[in-house]
Image (cartoon, grey):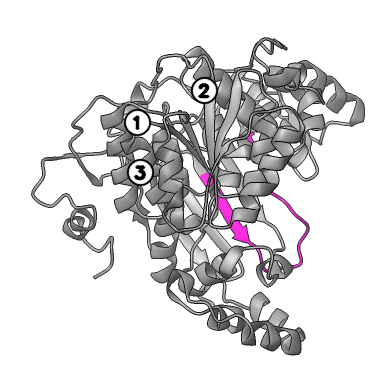
C-alpha cells in the first residue's frame, strides 16, 4: 500500500495508529504534541561552543577549518571511519596553535563516542545522507545541540521522530542549509522584509548541477553512496538548496505553511548515456568496486539502472495560496543554477544572473530589468547586514564564496548568545522531506500529496526570521593561540 493512500496508512507509517491525533493545516492527521513546540527555542548561552565534527570526507574538513576561526569556538572532537581523515584536519589544527581534538575512528560506531564526549556541546554532522537520521537522533538523545548537512531526513516517519525528540530534549536541531546565507539570497530576504517586492505570490528554486563525473569518481562519494541513492529512489532528494531561501522569504513555517504538492519526473537518460560514452572505464570501475554498502553492490550502482529521472519538478501550494516550484537535475550538461526567483505584486528578483525588476508605485509600466546603475543602487541599499559587516572576511574564509562561513558564524553566534537559530527543526524536516513526498507524487504521475504540518499548528505563532546579523568581536581572549579570524 502506498504511504499516502489513506490517512490510516500514513498514521501507521508514522507509528501513530491508536495515538491521539489532531488535524493539521494541510488536512493530514498529526500526532498530538507531548511537549511545548521549539519554534522559537532559546537555550542557555554557551560560553564556548565545543564542536564535534562527524564525517571528514567532502564537507567535514572545510567545516573544521571554518569553525576553528570563529571566536569562542573550539573543535574538540573529530570522527570518521578512516583514521587518515581524522589525522589530516588534526594536523592542520595543531600546526596553527590549536589544541588537538580527540579522534574517534576505526568502526561504524566510533561516531557515538564523539557524541557522548562531555567536551562536545554541538554535534556537526557531515556524513553521507543515509546516516543523518541516526546521528541526529542520537545527538539529541544525549542532550547535545546538532547541526546536520543537507538533507537531514527523507521520510515522514523519521521527521516525526526528529521533531518529537527535539521537543522532548529542548535542544537545537538545525539543517546546515548554506544557500540561505548566499549573498543574493540574503539580498532577496532584505528586499522582502522591506516590502520592496510587495505581497509575495510565487517562488522558484532548484538544484541544477552537472554531477555526472562526480558520481562516477572513486574519490568523490564514498562507496558511491549518491549513485546508490539514485538507483533506488526517484523524486527530488536534494530540494533544500533552492527551497530553503524561498521558504524564508515567504515565512513558510512562520506565518504560512505548505499544504499540498504535486511532482513529475522525466525519464532517466543522462546517466545511461554517460556510462555508454565511457563504457570501458565504467566497466573497469565496476569490476574493481564490489562493496555492498547501503543495500546494493557498487557494480550495480555504477552500471545502472537508476530510478532517478534527469529532471524532477515539484509544485507546492501554501495555506495562504502562494506557489513554489522546485527542480532537481544533476545529470544534464546545464550550467549551475539554483534559480532563486521570488515574485511579488511590486517586483521580482531572479538569480543566475542576478536581475531585479520593480514597480513600486503600481503604475503598471512596461517593466524591464534594472540597468547596471539601478542594480548597484539596489544592492548597496539593501545588501544584507550580515554580508555588509562580515562578507569580506567570509569570502576570505571561503566555503561557496563565503556563505558556508556566514552560516557557521551565525549558528555559533546564536548558541553563544542564547538566541533562536535561523533554521529550526520544523523547517529542517519540512524542507528535507520533499524527497519522499515528491517521489510518492511522481510515482502516481503527479497526483497531489498533502504536506504534513510538523509544527502542529505552531506556524501561526512562530516569529518570522528577521534581518539578523552578528556583533563580530575579534576577541583574542576567546581565541585559542590568538589564531582565530586570522585570515
The residue wearing badge 1 is 143
Locate residue 258: give its quadrant: top left
Dot 2 or dot 3, earlier in sequence: 3
The residue wearing badge 2 is 465
Q: Position of residue 116 (x, y in %)?
A: 39, 37
Is residue 335 part of the magenta span, yes or no? yes
Say few, some or many: other residues with alpha carbon within 10 Å of mark 1 (under 14 / 14 to 19 / 20 or more).
many
Q: What span is in magenta?
A: 324-343
Q: Residue furthest left?
A: 18
Marks 2 and 3, how far apart at CA: 25 Å
Give the secondary structure at mark 1: loop
Dot 2 or dot 1, earlier in sequence: 1
Q: Position of residue 37 (x, y in %)?
A: 29, 26
Q: Position of residue 134 (x, y in %)?
A: 38, 50
Q: Position of residue 225 (x, y in %)?
A: 55, 66
Q: Nearer the viewer, residue 37 or 101?
A: 101
Q: In the figure, 287 relative to 32: above or below? A: below
The residue wearing badge 3 is 137
Q: In the figure, 354 relative to 361: above or below? A: below
Dot 1 or dot 3, earlier in sequence: 3
Q: Nearer the viewer, residue 157 or 107?
A: 107
Amino acid at each position: 500500500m502506498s504511504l499516502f493512500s489513506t490517512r490510516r496508512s500514513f498514521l501507521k507509517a508514522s507509528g501513530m495508529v491508536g495515538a491521539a491525533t489532531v488535524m493539521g493545516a494541510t488536512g493530514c492527521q498529526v500526532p498530538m504534541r507531548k511537549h511545548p513546540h521549539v519554534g522559537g527555542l532559546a537555550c542557555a548561552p554557551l560560553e564556548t561552543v565545543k564542536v564535534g565534527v562527524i564525517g571528514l570526507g567532502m564537507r567535514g574538513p572545510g567545516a573544521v577549518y571554518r569553525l576553528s576561526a570563529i571566536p569562542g569556538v573550539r573543535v574538540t572532537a573529530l570522527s570518521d571511519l578512516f583514521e587518515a581523515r581524522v589525522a589530516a584536519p588534526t594536523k592542520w589544527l595543531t600546526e596553527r596553535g590549536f589544541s588537538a581534538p580527540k579522534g574517534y575512528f576505526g568502526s561504524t560506531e566510533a561516531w557515538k563516542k564523539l557524541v557522548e564526549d562531555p567536551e562536545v556541546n554541538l554535534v556537526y554532522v557531515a556524513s553521507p545522507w543515509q546516516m543523518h537520521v541516526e546521528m541526529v537522533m542520537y545527538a539529541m538523545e544525549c542532550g547535545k545541540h546538532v547541526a546536520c548537512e543537507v538533507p537531514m531526513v527523507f521520510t515522514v516517519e523519521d521527521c516525526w521522530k526528529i521533531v518529537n525528540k527535539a521537543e522532548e530534549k529542548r535542544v537545537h536541531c538545525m539543517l546546515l542549509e548554506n544557500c540561505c546565507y548566499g549573498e543574493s539570497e540574503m539580498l532577496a530576504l532584505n528586499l522582502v522584509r522591506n516590502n520592496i517586492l510587495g505581497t509575495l505570490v510565487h517562488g522558484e528554486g532548484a538544484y541544477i548541477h552537472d554531477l555526472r563525473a562526480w558520481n562516477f569518481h572513486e574519490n568523490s562519494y564514498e562507496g558511491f553512496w549518491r549513485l546508490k541513492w539514485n538507483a533506488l529512489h526517484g523524486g527530488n532528494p536534494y530540494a533544500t538548496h533552492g527551497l530553503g531561501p524561498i521558504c524564508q522569504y515567504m515565512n513558510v513555517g512562520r506565518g504560512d505553511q505548505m499544504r499540498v504538492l504535486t511532482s513529475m519526473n522525466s525519464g532517466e537518460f543522462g546517466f545511461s548515456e554517460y556510462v555508454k560514452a565511457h563504457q570501458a572505464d565504467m566497466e573497469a570501475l565496476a569490476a574493481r568496486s564490489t562493496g555492498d554498502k547501503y543495500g546494493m553492490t557498487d557494480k550495480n550502482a555504477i552500471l545502472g539502472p537508476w530510478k532517478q529521472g534527469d529532471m524532477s519538478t515539484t509544485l507546492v501550494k501554501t495555506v495562504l495560496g502562494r506557489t513554489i516550484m522546485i527542480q532537481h537535475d544533476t545529470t544534464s550538461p546545464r550550467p549551475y543554477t539554483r534559480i532563486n526567483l521570488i515574485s511579488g505584486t511590486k517586483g521580482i528578483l531572479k538569480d543566475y544572473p542576478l536581475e531585479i525588476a520593480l514597480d513600486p508605485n503600481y503604475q503598471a509600466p512596461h517593466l524591464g530589468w534594472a540597468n547596471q546603475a539601478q542594480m548597484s543602487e539596489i544592492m548597496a541599499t539593501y545588501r544584507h547586514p550580515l554580508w555588509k559587516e562580515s562578507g569580506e572576511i567570509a569570502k576570505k574564509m571561503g566555503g561557496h564564496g563565503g556563505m558556508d562561513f556566514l552560516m557557521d558564524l551565525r549558528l555559533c553566534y546564536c548558541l553563544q548568545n542564547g538566541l533562536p537559530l535561523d533554521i529550526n527543526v520544523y523547517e529542517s524536516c519540512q524542507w528535507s522531506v520533499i524527497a519522499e513526498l515528491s517521489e510518492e507524487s511522481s510515482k502516481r504521475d503527479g497526483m497531489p500529496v498533502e504536506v504534513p504540518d510538523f509544527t502542529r499548528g505552531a506556524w501561526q505563532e512562530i516569529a518570522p526570521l528577521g534581518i539578523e546579523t552578528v556583533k563580530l568581536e575579534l576577541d583574542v581572549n576567546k581565541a585559542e593561540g590568538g589564531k582565530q579570524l586570522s585570515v
